[in-house]
Image (cartoon, rainbow, N blue to C red):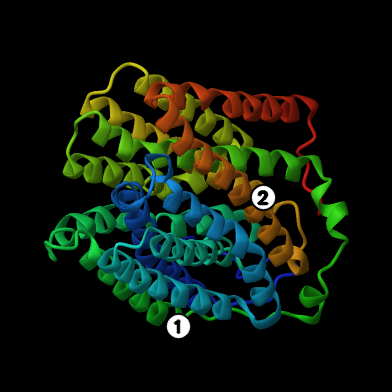
Amino acid sequence: MPDAKAPAASAGFPEISLQQQRGNIVRLTIAQALAGANAVVVFATGAIVGHMLAPSATLATLPISIFVVGMAACILPAGVIARRHGRRAAFLAGTGSGVLAGVVGAVAVLSASFWLFCLATFFAGVYAAVVQSFRFAAADGVSAALRPRALSFVMGGGVAAGIVGPQMVTYTMYMWPAYMFAATFIAQAAVAAVSAFVLLGVKLSMPTAAEIAGGRPLRQIVSQPLFITAVICGAVSYMLMNFLMTAAPLAMRLCGHSQESSNLGLQWHVIAMYGPSFFTGRLITRFGAQRVVMAGLLLTGVSAAVGLLGIEVAHFWLTLILLGVGWNFGFIGASSMVLECHRPEEKTRVQSLNDFIIFGTMAVGSFASGGILAAYDWDVVLWVSFVPLLLAVVVLALSATAGKAAPAR
């Protein structure tokens, strides 16, 4: 957790007491862990339930893609709610969607309705969209030097999600033998409800008149080279993580591996996604966000290369672990860069736009993943991932070389 002796706020940020900072970070970290279980349930079961219920094998991964669509579609509305009514209002709306996702998911399994299951994953995506703002909320009212650490500490709550989510699937998927995963979705709804109670205690400053007004024109803000670089790197990092993780559980099943092996692989993947968060902020402070992002992109490339070496369980697991660490460095590093691109009164607009672009791109990757896997095979999915990866590496390298990463404050 950031040093409690640090200044409570940097210039221009509404002051939040040290006690409130600590309380917010703890609650947001717990909520991140609980909400992470929501996403793990979708990724662990989405393609499998989709394969069971879909009218065509090519639609098996559609529920996961709909999850991503839900994220992309609700990022901007969530930002509007946060700007006008405060972040906590947006948080509670999101957790309500999480409860709804679990309930509708259970009903979909009981009624064997593929399209109802897609609706459930859409609601889960709405919940996940709101969860993305937890990392930025942790930085509110914190000094500039400590914002990367506050952001990454909250992201570290995903480590618990990496343990709770897959185990929740494993222990509940056969609890109702006639309806596989129905009990899992009921548990998903219960966990989202607990998260809502945790978030009730978050205390953040209400939006100021300047923040509601929005600050500078958005075109001026997004034209900054640093923002463009951050968005591209964040989008590619998240898209490739989703692109490969969406296909991996179904690919493992098609290769003859058990559901338990798939669940365990996802567990270590999610732990790898969030575990480094406890020191990623320090790495950003010491080496700079751009170097950390570059390390993340390179690790993502290595993960795809490992996947190409074979289809044993160990290959899938190592691919998912490296992919998780690569995502962590790439996404948190890019998020830290975004924090340098806006003034305090512009934060919700800029952060929401950043996430909208990222998850819109991620939706494209998610749809493509299932189609490529169904039409070709796992190896082709891995080879395709190198194309956007190379783009991000080139953009980041050019930005660093040109020296255009100066903050826009």
Task: Give residue 154's position: percent from left, percent from top.
Answer: 45, 60
**Marks 1 and 2, how far apart in space?**
30 Å
The reply, left or right, for residue 341 in relation to residue 3 is: right
Task: Give residue 111's position: percent from left, percent from top.
Answer: 29, 68
Query: What secondary structure is marked by label 1?
Result: loop
- Residue type marked 2: Ile
Q: Badge 2: how crowded within 10 Å, few (<14), some, or many (20+)?
A: some
Q: Residue furthest front?
A: 55
- Residue type marked 1: Gly
Q: Which residue is mark 2?
A: 357
The reply, left or right, for residue 277 in relation to residue 184 is: right
- Residue depicted at x 80% and y 35%: 404
- Residue depicted at x 48% and y 24%: 301
Which of the 4 quarters of the picture holds residue 42? bottom left
Task: Give residue 162's position: percent from left, percent from top.
Answer: 30, 52
Task: Give residue 328's position: percent from left, percent from top.
Answer: 47, 43
**Quadrant of the rendering where the C terminus is positioned:** bottom right
The reply, left or right, for residue 96 in relation to residue 144 is: left
